[in-house]
Amino acid sequence: MAKPASPPEDIHLFRQEVVDAVALPPPNRAEPPRKRIKPLPLQRLKDEKQVLLDSLADPWEILDQGGRDLIESGEELFFARPGVPAAALRKLKRGGWVIQAELDLHGLRSDEARLALAEFLLDCARHDCRCVRIIHGKGLRSKNREPVLKHKLRHWLTQRDDVLAFCQARPADGGSGAAIVLLKSNPR
């Protein structure tokens, strides 16, 4: 709504009253420069946080000059065929390969597990999967709380020509209850 106009006599009276008024001097203050806020590198902060978590989660490895692990408890699962570079096994142990398929052997008897493993590896060859995870369990529900399938899996995998290397999974991928397996590429 528009403001109603003042009558001309009111304007004249106002000007007579303020004729002696003096304007205030300008303020004697310096206007401080505004500081620019630096942008937050959110992605870099996330990356640094993830690196810190990864460094705390990864187990320490002590390797000899050939890349072999010097600290072995006898329970760790690893193998590399002759001719497979030590760097490939190190990369496998550190989780440097993308896991493309997974097989869970929990609750299977030995003969069922062996058949499931054979079918799984054939399927992986058909789909050209190079890195897979096989969950064998830690044996917590078996007699003597021993990992039965873990020891059998080691034997079964070393017998197969399509298996280049395998190792115990990192804690984030299943730890001592799983194995990460590197398979030969499927020539077409």
Image (tube, rainbow, N blue to C red):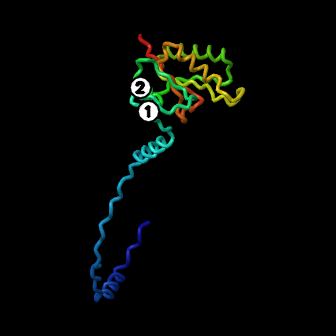
Mark 1 residue element: loop
- Percent across and percent down for residue 159 are 53, 13
Cβ–Cβ under 8 Å for marks 1 and 2: yes
- Percent across and percent down for residue 26 are 27, 79
Q: Which residue is mark 2?
A: 86
Residue count near mark 1 (Cα–Cα under 10 Å), binned few <14, some 14–19, many ≥20: few
Labels in figure, total: 2
Residue type, mark 1 in image: Leu
- State the image quarter where residue 185 is shown: top left
Residue in the image at 55% along x and 29% along y: 76
Mark 2 residue element: helix
Q: Is residue 75 left or right of residue 12?
A: right
Label located before the other in sequence (1 or 2): 1
Indicate which disc residue 75 carries.
Answer: none
Of 162 and 98, nearer the camera is: 162
Q: Is residue 1 left or right of residue 20?
A: right
Of 65 and 124, nearer the camera is: 65
Q: Which residue is mark 1?
A: 63
